[in-house]
Image: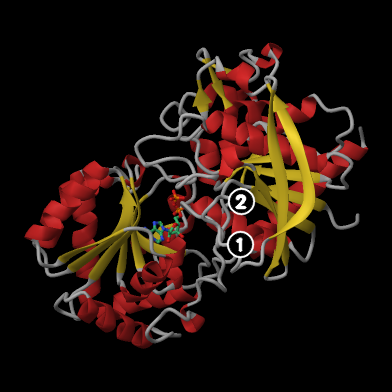
Amino acid sequence: MSRPSVLFASSEVYPFAKSGGLADVAHSLPRALNAECKIEVVMPLYRFVDRQKFNIFPLDISFEIIMNGTAYPIEIYGCEFEGLNYRFVYAPLLCDRDFLYGTAENGYEDNALRFALFDRAVVSMLKNSDYDIVHLNDWQSGLVPLLIQEEQDIETKTLFTIHNLAYQGTFDHKVLTEIGIDEKYFTIDGIEFYGQLNFMKAAIAYADMVTTVSPNYAKEILSTEFGCGLEGFLKHHEKKLVGIVNGIDTEHFSPSDDKVLIAPYRDLRGKAVNKSAYLKERRLKGARKPLFVFIGRFTWQKGMDLLIEALPKIAEQECNVAILGEGEEKYYSALKGIADECENVHLEFGYDESLSHRMYAAADFLLMPSLFEPCGLNQMIAMHYGEVPIVHGVGGLADTVGDYKDFDAKKSEGFGIVFDTPSLNALIKAVDQAIKLYTDKTHYNRVAKHNMACDFSWQESAKSYLGLYKKIIQKRSHG
Ligand code: ADP
């Protein structure tokens, strides 16, 4: 079979626009597939994307999309970046905003319209094209499989990846007319979800295959606890659901070659230089004490309530804690209150890619008490930078982190401190275990060194995606 031709659609792609792990995946998975597939990536050309820096230029492709009698002008832009072709959809309604989706508390009210427009533009790109597969990601591109149902001249097959089932793109029923979708799709087997529209559900209903970002999460989402109301529907479509664990871009996250580090390193001795530099820079005392970091969105999913409850107790111990993130105001003010009180707790507020790299390089332990975690990239990045992660054993965290008590140097997986229930006691106990492990330098170094040597690249997972693409294409040719 010749190389599959793939259009990879995502609402965010690093380094153009990023709010979380989806952007990392949309950056690194297509690159990992580039040798085996003919792959192009498409995303919205948000106002804040740096057109000059990335040499993004108009492709002289413009058209109108009509939804409910209103014409929306669309322009397609393009660039080549690090050996890959990118396509950008520009429409004022979709792109001329300060944020991708809105604030942490509230999404933009017209998000249904914005992303229906993006999805319709993607469908236009499929017409008369030679794309075998369109690979869609999360609810923002979730309407594409349904829209293809209406097109006679599109042969392209669809693969939809769920990166986070908690964000489904649900909207009022009245939006159906605004986005120009026929009422016939508003059924229990289609886009309808408790009287509302649900983009994610439409994707699960109409896509040829559905994947999610770890095998464990693929099982969890069939349960009431993690299924976010879609567990029954997913069970119904279980045959086309597969879990493939994410990888990380080991070129971008490379401790030995990371340009933003004070001292790129290949071993734990080199890592210690980065720790000292970070502590000094942030006026934290005690290079011999363990440094715990948390990096991520300030939202309930990431276990923020638990972390905030535990933090004053953790700070009583001989350690330093540094937190980097942005998100909900209530979490920020609670964290700020603790950081003001405790001199060994340092808060870094905002989104800062370089700083995150320097913190991964500096830290001994990563705190990741997520209530649920489809895959999680932080724990893999942390292990790659020679840290020991402390994780709640759910979703992809359970797939990627083995408990240090079962440490086995011959295993290819990384190790950390894994706790089973997301409770205050369990988190405090895990931190106690971490501090104890840290005092036994030989033991700690063995685990951290092993983690650094593990393969968290996309290599294996990219092969699984390639296998799925081929399977879908074969199904098509067999009718
Ligand atoms: P999410 O649920 O947010 O997608 P993931 O673990 O899958 O979580 O991916 C998070 C990605 O975003 C990682 O690359 C992490 O380093 C990065 N990240 C999260 N918050 C910040 C921040 N405030 N500054 C810099 N990078 C961040």
Ligand 1: give its quadrant: bottom left
Element on which disc 2 rests: loop
User: Mark 2 or 1 closer to N-term?
Assistant: 2
**Which amino acid type is marked by label 2?**
Leu
Q: Which residue is mark 1?
A: 51
**Left or right of 336 in this view: 203:** right
Looking at the image, is 28 positioned above or below residue 327? Answer: below
Instruction: Give the position of the N terminus as an image quadrant.
Output: bottom right
Q: Residue at x 75, y 44 (%)?
A: 134
Dots 2, 1 in contact, CB < 8 A: yes
Judge whether 199 appears above or below 51 on screen. Answer: above
Residue at 24% in and 56% down: 430
Residue 183 appears in which quarter of the rendering?
top right
**Residue 105, percent across and down?**
34, 37
Of residues 422 and 348, which is closer to you in this image? Answer: 348
Whole-number angstrom distance, CA of label 2 to CA of label 1: 9 Å
Q: State which quadrant residue 358 falls in.
A: bottom left
Q: Amino acid at mark 1?
A: Arg
| Res. 194 visible in picture | yes
Q: Quadrant of residue 451?
A: bottom left
Label drawn at residue 45: 2
**Residue drawn where x is 54% and y is 71% of the image:** 252
- Quadrant (top left/top right/bottom left/bottom right) for the C terminus: top right
